[in-house]
Image: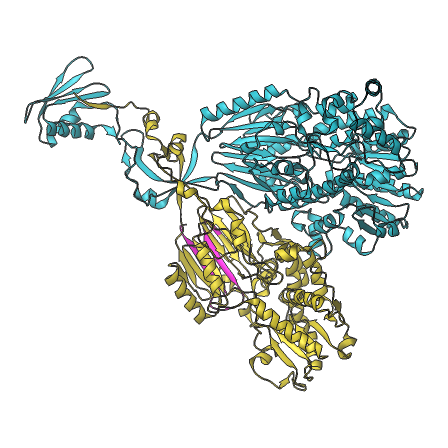
Amino acid sequence: MQLVSLSISLLIFVFILYMCLEVSSGEFVNTLQTLLSKGNGFHFPPCYILELCGFNVLLECPVDLSALKIFSPIPSHSYQCTDVEDSVSLASNNPSSDEREHKRRKVEKKSLEAKDLICAEPWFKMVTNLHLWDLSFIDMVIISSPMGMLGLPFLTRNKNFSAKIYATEVTTRLGQLMMEDLVSMNMEFKQFYGPEESELPEWLKWNELELLPIELKNILMGEDGATLGAWQSLYSTADVKDCINKCQTLKYAEEACYNDTLSIKAFSSGLEIGASNWIINAPRKNITYLSSSIFESAHAMSFDYNSLHGNDLILFSDFSTLSSIIGASNDANVSGSSQDSQSTATGALRNDLENKDSLISSDDSSEEMDKIAFIGSCAIDSVRQGGSVVIPFGRIGIVLLLLEQISMFLESSNIEVPIFMISTVAEEILAYTNIVPEWLCKQRQENLYSGDALFGHVELLKRKCLHLFPAIHSIEFLKTWQEPCIVFAPHWCLRLGPVVHLLRRWCGDPNSLLVLEQEVDAVLALLPFKPVVLKVLQCSFLSGIKIQKIQSVLDMLRPKLVLFPQDLRVNLPTPSPSSYTVRHYSENETLHITSLKKDFEVNLATDLAFQLRPTMLKQENLAIARVKGNLILHHGKFMLDPVRELVESSTNQRSMKWGPLDPNLLLQALQEKGLNGSFHQEASKVSMILIDDPNKASIEIHAMRTVIRADDESLASLLFEAVKSVLNGI
Amino acid sequence: MVGIECLVLGAGQEVGKSCVIVSFGGKRIMFDCGMHMGYLDQRRYPDFSRIPDSSDFTKSLTCIIITHFHLDHIGALPYFTEVCGYDGPIYMTYPTKALAPLMLEDYRKVMVDRRGEEEQFTSEHIATCLKKVTAVDLKQSIKVDDDLEIRAYYAGHVIGAAMFYAKVKDSALVYTGDYNMTPDRHLGAASIDKFLHLDLVITESTYATTVRDSKYAREREFLKVVHECVGKGGKVLIPTFALGRAQELCILLDDYWERMNLKDIPIYFSAGLTLQANMYYKMLIGWTSQKIKDSYATRNAFDFKHVRSFERSMLNAPGPCVLFATPGMISGGFSLEVFKQWAPSEMNLVTLPGYCVAGTIGHKLISGKATKIKIDRETEVDVRCKIHQLSFSPHTDSKGIMDLVKFLSPKHVILVHGEKPKMATLKGKISSELGIKCYDPANNDVVHIPSSQYVKVDASEAFVHKCINPNPKHFESKADNDSDMDPKDTASLPMKEIEYKRVAEGILVMDKTKRPKAVHQNELLAMLGVEEHRIEFA
């Protein structure tokens, strides 16, 4: 799927709009919401900028890892060695016109070849529109899942960036491990290609870009070149460490407060272990940030929707139904293009899975478990036939479930085949997932209570059925290695990590099996491994709220306003009338949301309340009183405390009078002060009270104005007092 | 109902059967539901009949909160839920929920199987009772209902021990349970947020007058005597309960064994209990100290390298060893059996905790230089072995209590879980030094304290924004000017230290039918629907 891109000028326009609004509307008036990227599925969640109470909040900072597919995997010694040297020399020397011509002809060719891929250390593609923001404008970052934080070091290594970052403890830890794994996998490229010579790599230069096949060019530049600026060379281990140090980690539903104004809390979303939805509270605003959520998970704690109840505004950011639609159409493409003879087998496998998908819809969790079981049985079939299985999944939770399922199948079918997990962070991930019962599903928590390990891998490691290795280079690994076997190894893009070497080994074996997630574009992903003979199984996993459940989730949460993706508009069945308003948003469009509440809620301290001196008004059972206090904003709530310091000097209060003046009452008031006045009706709306003693004076009464005339100053002030006393006022 | 009413059902001027009923804002919470180890009659449980509307506890109580798994805090819970019939919500932390059944079951067995007493509750009672428990994470904000919010904070005392914050409307309190203000080998120090605006803190006061020095010196001393003993070929008996102390000492020894290269000398755990308990500790490592927590991936600190399980046949095997045996205090069972065998040799060593319940062998050993100890009518044991009394305790000392109270600065303090005369001293100190009203009620006493209340008003935008006199000095962080609390903890939350203060003035309009509204003076006339009447001088 292509990312929708936007011309730079439009974004600048949005920017200007921002500035104007900020100036004109004051500090607390509005909420602005901008979708920077709708992402693409589980591994690339959507990304937003919210402006709340004058603060800019970035929601998620993912990386589009699927874009890595434009790069060639690291060449192996036995494979394509000469070819690589060719392209390296092409890249480094100034290509002669002949060579250029040769390349151009290649560009015009219809089908993409492995040679077309870029042979260089891969760069990583951030959210396209994020790099156009001035990072120093971001005040706060909220991260909902490990996938949502993979791009964070790109921000934190920029010295202009100073925002506060919030994520759950588990998300931060798993995110850190995933980032560290990326760094060490990328290291292989660094060692191969050597240090980069200039700031801008060859392949990113204009004349090279022109020569790229259109498929790659689209990924690299977007349709109009807008995404070019999103590419960054990968961060370092030090950058990751520095980034993690800047994260403020939160426990389940722990309240954190930004600047005492925005108070946030994370609740499980069920998508992955540690993944969360958020409640954001601020004066006059309570917002639910609803990311992709799963009602019932077999690993992570399920979607905790009860805790999200009753907020006025829901930012619905679950795009999973969108990618499932596109996934389905992709599917047809893959089987249609029928590259190798094996794709029929793949197609058959996949159709089977699709059927399962449509049949079972009652229970999310059991449906997911069926898929896991299906993959498990396919894996068993392969090893039975002497083939090996490689599973480059990026979903930690699914990997853990598969481990349990496959080992169980192996045991029950009496097959002794080793399971390997090869990754620099495998050991840590497995150990970590066994110490976070607070973020696991109910059944796993029951394991805690009965003293059993939270996941099956603990037992597998103990029984030595599962072997963990950081890389495939060690002697220890070679000693243990045995085929057929089942291997879990990153990376799902099939460009980085141990999976590349394993695929090279097995891609010609018709009995071996590669299992991919549905989101992976298999045609492009497998390009460098052609001809591909091994079986390929692609499986989609639930990545969010199902279409038919969206409506009931929204109804249940009882918001007043829902911000809903325009792209999913068709998916939302008729919104139930009048219960809430729905506004639709699209990429790079700023929604301007006026506060749902007009007034702020303020807690008035009791002692201050006792100091009030209320005046009863004649009309409508009203009383009014002047109030003055220290206005304290604490955790998003206002409190008004008595002023203890003596700061009386600076007051802006003035006395006010209103309503018509009753001449009879005034005469009476004058009399009490020992003054005798005489009443004269002048024009229709003006009357006059004249006073002779002790000096001459007059009071001219208009509808909303009273004029006092007196030469004697003390008399004038006496009259003023009398007039004031008979008017309503404060 | 205005104010907070505290009914102390247990641990009033004593240690044992902690249980405080707090009623405020129309809610009623039971904090802890413990039993008293010192009594076998009805005094072992809190007198639940004193709870208002005691005919239906489920209706009477909003919820029960348990601070940690020690029996004097949870021992009566299965009885209260399964026998007395309370069926409402119960909250405790994940480790407490996981480990409490072990403690309760162990206690039930000792009561029924060994002492042949009538059963107060069954194993099934324990299981069904714990099923009703909602486990909570630290700092997790839990809405018990629309008005009541509770939150657990790390207390350090044992794994999973928590202090609980409870808030109804505008009044809030903290019930500490047992806590430790200094970190130990496996647990961190207690840690809680500042600015909780508390009306009341109910704190333990076990060491109300003791001030302790460094723990590390005392740990070194323990290791020294153990090393000396095994170095000379002696056997070390460490009687302990399955949970808590056993793991702490084990981490200490395992680490020491590694450093001193003592791997030839075995460390044993007596059958069952403790190795099983280590499984729990491994999964709950996130609740231990930072240092231990960081060990999870390389080697979980509860994967003890040098520890093996003990067979009865090894009892008289030659050569040095260290043995952890249950129950603690040598109150019977296996630890007593081992004691009988090992005590007569002067090469051997028995370590005992600082506090042993009267009537146990442990109590006899620490209360005097006993050379002969009568076990029962027929048996008498010559005690020639060395006795080492461990002087570290997982309770805070009096300085820690004072620090916590000062840090939280509540309006009132209630002391529980301590000894009467010492509590009185501490009470005096809190009111004189901190100027905070302090109470030390006896069991079944009721303490009434006032609670704070706010009047909710609406405020217009102009009222909030057109403040005068913004006071910039309040924007500075107050992080460093107070508190002896864990400096890391406070430093990591600098945002919470900032208070945002401005003077607002305006007019409060009070309508009998609506919530009062504060408006800026310029908005008043429009709001009242009137026109200004100007007074001029000509």
Query: Is residue B8 rendered magenta in the image?
Result: yes
Say above or below: B312 vs B142.
Answer: below
The quarter of the displayed image where residue B180 is located: bottom right
In the rendered image, residue A428, in percent from the top left (x then y), is placed at 72, 49
In the rendered image, residue A561, in percent from the top left (x then y), is placed at 55, 28
Give the colour of chain B. yellow
Say above or below: A711 vs A414.
Answer: above
Q: Is residue A718 visible?
A: yes
The quarter of the displayed image where residue B368 is located: bottom right
| Of residues B479 and B344, the one drawn nearer to the viewer in this rendering | B479
Give the colour of chain A. cyan
Report the coloring of the rendering: by chain
Placement of the C terminus of chain B among the 4 image quadrants: top left
Query: Is residue A402 rendered magenta in the image?
Result: no
Left or right of B430 on screen, residue B342? right
| Of residues B369 and B72, the one drawn nearer to the viewer in this rendering | B369
The residue depicted at 88 percent of the width and 34 percent of the height is: A81
Chain part drawn in magenta: B1-27
Considering every residue shown, the one lying at the far top of the view is A683
